[in-house]
Image (cartoon, rainbow, N blue to C red):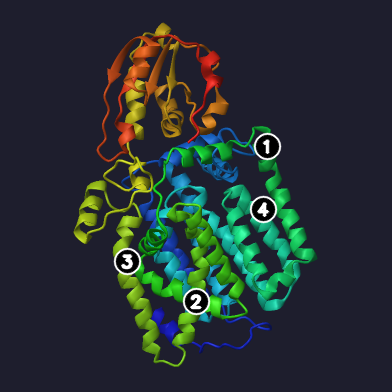
Amino acid sequence: MSATLAQQEPYSTKSLSDRLPQLAIGAMIALCACKLLLHLFTSVRNYGYFRDELYYLDLARHLDWGYVDCAPLIAVYAKVALLMGGSLAALRILPALAGTALIALTMLVARELGGNRYSQFLAGLCILLCPSILVTDSLLTMNAFEPLYWMGCILVIARILRTGNSRLWLWFGVLAGLGLENKHSTLFFGFAVTVALLLTPNRREFAKWIWIAGAIAIALFLPNLIWEAHRHFPTIEDLENVRREGKNVVLGPLAFVKQQIIVLDPILLLVWFPGLIWLLRDRKWRVLGLTFVVFFVTMEISHGKDYYVFPIYPMLFAAGGVAIAHWLENRAAWTRAVVVGVIVLATVPLIPMATWMLSPERLLAYQNAIGFKPAKQEVHMESLLMQPIADQFSWPELVQQVASIYNSLPPDERSETGIWAGNYGEAGAINQLGPQYGLPTAYSRHQNHWYWGPPPQVYKNLIVIEWGLDDVQDNCTSYQEFDRYNRFAMGEENSPIYLCRGVKFDIQKIWWHSHHWN
């Protein structure tokens, strides 16, 4: 494929206001098919539900206009998965489809920037092979969908810059508004776009259509904003708790840049960084380059996690494809094939670590063999595996163990026994996998679970998960301890389970006294 594309039409720097380059339809279909098949054959192998996926399934059972720690659209995606049965395959097909769409969208952005078919292919190839994007598209989270909204906005801006049609800002408003309902970080993306416009002659776009677009975005975001205001902005409280308690690893400026290069794959720096330089140097597209710079600096200053920047990189891959094609314009055709070959050879070895194709034992052996150790994102994270993988272990065993304890009780005692989970992953596991064992609904005061309590009855006994021994001794007349251990799970999931008999408090009365938002 690369050889064919390498011999195609020469790259042109001529203004494309009247005509876009030919769309690389064959390459788009091939890359999208590879992306989808890769996830279909790897995303449900070896591992299980991701902790957050279990939580999102609980959100889907309680559809609302907002949640403590996320915008509402993730619950809609999870609801679709529930309607398809709620299986792991039903969940994972959605991010796989989102990632497939991202390849097509990135190629369209490259075309809008004036990229020929080789440029489009190169941009799509980078999306297909980028390790951080592969990880993101292997789990059902809002992060898999976020780049679609952002790149849709970028495509609209690029078309406005190319055609001068300011009415297209209306579509930007729609996509930005939906992006806000997907994840609140779209606010920072919108801020970056606004600053970039003000820093360039494109500030003239602040006329009628862009203000209407802003009104559309606010209108779409308004239901979530009202939900937040009605509950005194729990999301802000949650974020402040994370900051105050030092939950996340904070990287300095140089470490933050280094981490970006590593997680995206160092070889791809040779695509996205020239893309950034090309955007900044070209007066026509400079506003796009400045959008990235402003957003990147904002994330570093605010101590954002490294993956917060990922959704904007497809724009740079698109621009990088155009810049490289321009650079190779007067060189031999085989140089284009060499660029593709180098990218493939350098990125393919990382695919086993960015997808779920290897068992945990083989994955650890592979990481040791190539000398790779994933960086921690949270200060207290303890696991042999990186967090997105470790958080997929222990859930079936947890539910089976809780079911064994619960079903061993006499019927009259069982009816007076509830389940209290320490975090939303444990509660989500009980609620997703527990019904087949006859388990009741699990309750928790973690994140949005707090709003779904208290339980409808006062329990005499509780099966408690992730309680400290001191808490058990203080609040239980008597108790039994049940050890649990999974070497691949997060350390917190190896704490004992307790059967707390003779609970010393009224769960309905104490429920509203405190919540755990972090």
Q: CA distance from mark 3 to mark 4?
A: 36 Å
What's the CA distance linking mark 4 and mark 2?
29 Å
Residue 86 visible to the viewer: no
**Residue at position x 74%, y 73% in the image:** 165
Q: CA distance from mark 2 to mark 3?
A: 26 Å
Residue 159: x and y in percent read: 66, 73
Picture residue at 41% right of the left edge, 15% below the top: 462
- CB within 8 Å, label 4 to label 1: no
Q: Tag 2: residue type? A: Ile
Residue 277 numbered tag: 2
Residue 325 lies left or right of residue 483; in this view the side is right
Mark 1 residue type:
Ala
**Of helix, strand and loop, which one carries label 4?**
helix
Residue 348 numbered tag: 3
Which part of the image, by quadrant, shows the N terminus?
bottom left
Label 1 sits on a secondary structure element that is helix
Q: Which mark is residue 229?
A: 1
**2 or 3: mark nearer the eye:** 2
Question: Going from the N terminus, do you reach mark 4 or mark 1 first?
Answer: 4
Whether residues under marks 3 and 4 lie with C-beta atoms below 8 angstroms apart, the answer is: no
